[in-house]
Amino acid sequence: MDIGVSLSPKKTEFAPLLFSGNLIKGMENARHLGYTGVELSLLDSSEIKKEWLMDKLEELNLKVYAIATGQTYYTDGYSLYSEEENKRWHAVNRVKGHIDLAVKLGSMVIIGGIRGKITAKVEAIKELEEKGKLALKACIEYAESKEVTLLLEPVNRYETNIINTLDESLELIEEIGSDHLKLLPDTFHMNIEEQSIEKSIVRAGSSIGYMHFADSNRLAPGWGHIDFPKVLSALKKIKYNGPIGIEVLPEPDDYRAAEQAVRYMSSIIKEVNK
């Protein structure tokens, strides 16, 4: 099982990223510590020097497993479920740009924080949910045309009120019915929302396209109370063989968080696969 770490070329308000604002340092340290890939958290893919990025990835022998898109909401306020139509379509266009980059990198694209948060009056919520689905479907149609997989990430109730649990995600994935829409469970969010992380993973089964790992306190795995051997055993049970991404707070600092995560997870993976 390959392990990647979440990085960002820009400093961002979104906290669980390592080496935020210093992509070169992040990639070099990822390679040094034994990561096989990275996840890139991007505001706008048009700002990335694509040839430079691809050359650097090749030099370090790193893959890009996924592109995270939440900065579009956290920084610019554009979201797929916004009350304002222009903001919804700004978000769609950002996702399309990420999909174009994903084609070059051979990566997936995450639909998590970019969903935003519904703040409309109760009587308008249902209508806004439908408009959000239309925006999401526009992203999926574009992803299908480019043969890129989108990842629907359930996010806990304290960060959004749109799709908090794996079951809610699975219902939407089934409703949309696209082979290019998969599930991204995150152990930090699951620890808040799921009755059982392991049972939820087993129930999701082959719908899972990627995993985020962080401990109960959003620190590196092993520094909280999530039972990661059980989580990995559940993934083994459903025959998941994709990558896992480390998305954690940079505490006590970026390097030690990255070091703890890859060291701890590598040892647990080895133990579970015996």
Image (cartoon, helix red, strand yellow):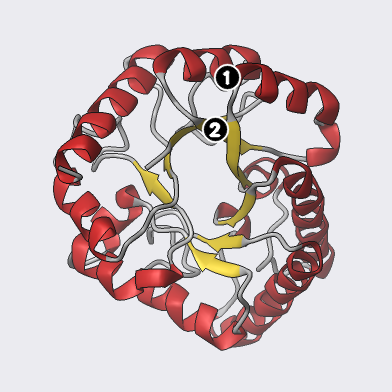
Determine the image quadrant of residue 238.
bottom left
Residue 228 position, x and y percent, is 19, 45
Q: Distance between the Cα atoms at labels 1 and 2?
A: 7 Å
In the image, residue 145 above or below residue 245? below
Q: Which residue is mark 1?
A: 27
Left or right, 65 with reference to 264: right
Q: Residue at x 19, y 29 (%)?
A: 223
Query: Between residues 182 and 97, which one lies in front from this camera angle?
Result: 182
Q: Quadrant of the N terminus?
A: top left
Q: Secondary structure at mark 1?
A: helix
The three-letter code of the residue at mark 2 reads Val
Q: Residue at x 25, y 57 (%)?
A: 236
Q: Amino acid at mark 1?
A: Met
Give the residue at x 77% y 73%: 141
Indicate left or right for 37 with 76 as reference. Answer: left
Q: Name the one closer to the observer, 257 or 118.
A: 257
In the rendered image, the quadrant that contains the C terminus is top left
* Front position in the image: 117 or 29: 29
Residue 133, above or below 74: below
Q: Is the Cβ of the residue at disc 1 closer than 8 Å to that at disc 2?
A: yes
Inspect this view and state whether residue 251 appears.
no
Q: Tell me the SS state at disc 2.
A: strand
Residue under the point 61% across and 28% down: 8
Q: In terms of depth relative to the viewer, which is nearer, 274 or 206?
A: 274
Q: Position of residue 92 (x, y in %)?
A: 78, 61
Q: Position of residue 132 (x, y in %)?
A: 67, 74
Above or below, 237 against 134 in this view is: above
Residue 79 lies in quadrant: bottom right
Which labelled disc corresponds to residue 38? 2
Q: Answer few, some or many: residues within 10 Å of disc 2's Cα (few below 14, many 20 plus, some between 14 and 19).
A: many
The mark found on residue 4 in the picture is: none
